[in-house]
């Protein structure tokens, strides 16, 4: 295995010859996208190679900008970024990209409140806090300093590839002073869409066709925004896969190309995933189980049971009557078919294997990616362990990924990154499964199944919205 060398930004650098599984599909996807952009006279010169600097310098977008406000957890921020990139492309504007917010999710607030809150999140005046040891007295302003951090998007995803289709400016600060410095004009002269609710504004590329039922207060045409003369258009929330209603094929092609570039590229995550994958048995199946927060925590029993059904039916192919029989044991707290489990060769498995048909498909190794704090004792996870003798969790591989990730830290504020990166590693490992099921209603699970898993299998991503 090619070793990774130190690098100031990541802690590691990628091997130069890393092969992407979906390289051929992505090339054709970009080719299709560029043809659409050429056909509709959008900023790219047909038949010529596109470079980030050239795209920015040769376009009117260099003088006009689009900004938005991030909130909520990582994957809601990712969806907002996808929407912002697409919208900026359609508006012919450079996108101002805020940093990724890692830690306790920031709840949505109305435009002005959220904007002030985000400004206060940055640690420009708190750098003295990074040198304090845990057992030292902490001044009030340093409380919670290690609980959150902000990092640039190019730490996690391939922004160089994104720049080939959309000019971006990566913001280090969301202050008014920093924003005025970027656009070169007073903020008072710009155009703001100040949302007052999470689903206030929706953006559409056409008003033709049958009106759709939706949850948004106001609908704005992209064409009307495109004609705005102000140097900056500043939006609030862009979260939700339904935020942009795109009906034109060329616009959907842009969204697909953007979404296909959202997989993780951090070298430590790639290395840890690869090493864990070499230990897991080929042909393992995966489940991405969200039960640790929000509505998923409130209804964890129903959420987990549906995921369990999908797994037993669609991933290992158990027949319906066997699933029904098995379910009556598993979800009533009983030990599962102990008379059928006689193989005690459990060097790598948690319990005895099934000794013969029709239950042997359940001997398939299962990797469960979950936000449950203690999965082996969590009531939502126990049925998976009881059903699949060879069930694995990320912490089973701590000796593999720990040395790779223990010393990762954000160079900007000194905050250790490992605990923030664990859900990303969990998702990357489960996406390597032969088949994977997710949690219904989870944007994180959708990302695992729609993007990470499909790209690992060399398939086009699943597009939503």
Image (cartoon, rainbow, N blue to C red):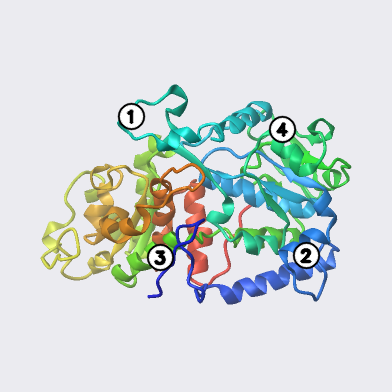
| Residue 327: percent from left, percent from top | 27, 51
Reading the image, the residue beneath label 4 is 217
Say which mark, if any, is on residue 271: 3
Q: Secondary structure at mark 2?
A: helix
Q: Nearer the viewer, mark 1 or mark 2?
A: 1
Q: Is residue 314 visible?
A: no
Q: Secondary structure at mark 1?
A: loop
Give the residue at x 48% y 50%. Answer: 444
Residue 382 relative to residue 431: left or right: left
Q: Neighbour class for label 1 at 10 Å: few (<14), some, many (≥20)?
A: few
Give the residue at x 33% y 73%. Answer: 282
| Residue 62: percent from left, percent from top | 80, 53
Give the residue at x 50% y 62%. Answer: 452
Reading the image, the residue beneath label 1 is 136
Q: Nearer the viewer, residue 106 or 455?
A: 106
Q: In the picture, residue 159 is in which quadrant?
A: bottom right
Q: Earlier in the sequence, mark 1 or mark 2?
A: 2
């Amino acid at each position: 295995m090619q070793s990774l060398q130190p690098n100031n930004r990541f802690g590691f650098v990628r091997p130069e010859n890393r092969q992407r599984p979906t390289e051929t599909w992505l090339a054709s996807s970009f080719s299709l996208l560029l043809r659409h952009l050429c056909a509709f006279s959008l900023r790219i010169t047909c038949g010529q190679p596109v470079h980030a600097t050239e795209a920015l310098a040769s376009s009117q977008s260099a003088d006009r900008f689009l900004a938005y406000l991030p909130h909520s957890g990582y994957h809601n921020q990712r969806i907002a970024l996808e929407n912002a990139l697409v919208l900026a492309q359609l508006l012919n504007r450079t996108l101002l990209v805020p940093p990724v917010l890692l830690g306790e999710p920031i709840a949505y607030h109305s435009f002005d409140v959220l904007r002030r809150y985000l400004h206060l999140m940055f640690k420009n005046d708190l750098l003295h806090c990074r040198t304090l040891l845990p057992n030292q007295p902490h001044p009030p302003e340093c409380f919670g300093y290690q609980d959150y951090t902000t990092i640039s998007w190019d730490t996690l995803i391939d922004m160089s590839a994104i720049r080939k289709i959309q000019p971006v400016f990566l913001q280090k600060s969301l202050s008014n002073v920093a924003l005025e410095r970027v656009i070169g004009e007073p903020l008072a002269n710009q155009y703001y869409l100040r949302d007052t609710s999470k689903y206030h504004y929706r953006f559409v590329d056409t008003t033709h066709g049958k009106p759709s039922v939706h949850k948004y207060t106001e609908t704005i045409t992209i064409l009307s925004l495109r004609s705005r003369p102000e140097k900056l258009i500043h939006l609030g929330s862009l979260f939700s896969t339904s935020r942009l209603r795109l009906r034109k094929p060329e616009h959907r092609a842009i969204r697909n190309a953007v979404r296909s570039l959202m997989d993780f590229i951090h070298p430590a995550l790639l290395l840890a995933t690869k090493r864990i994958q070499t230990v897991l048995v080929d042909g393992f199946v995966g489940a991405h189980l969200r039960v640790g927060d929000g509505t998923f925590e409130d209804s964890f029993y129903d959420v987990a049971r549906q995921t369990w059904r999908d797994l037993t039916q669609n991933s290992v192919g158990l027949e319906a009557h066997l699933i029904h029989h098995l379910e009556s044991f598993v979800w009533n707290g009983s030990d599962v078919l102990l008379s059928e489990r006689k193989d005690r060769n459990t060097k790598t498995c948690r319990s005895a294997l099934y000794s013969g048909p029709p239950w042997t498909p359940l001997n398939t190794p299962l990797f469960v990616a979950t936000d449950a704090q203690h999965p082996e004792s969590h009531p939502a996870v126990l049925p998976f362990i009881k059903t699949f003798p060879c069930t694995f969790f990320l912490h089973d591989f701590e000796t593999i990924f720990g040395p790779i990730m223990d010393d990762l830290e954000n160079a900007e504020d000194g905050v250790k990154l490992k605990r923030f990166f664990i859900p990303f590693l969990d998702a990357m490992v489960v996406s390597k499964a032969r088949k994977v099921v997710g949690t219904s209603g989870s944007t994180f699970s959708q990302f695992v199944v729609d993007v990470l898993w499909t790209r690992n299998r060399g398939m086009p991503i699943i597009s939503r919205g």
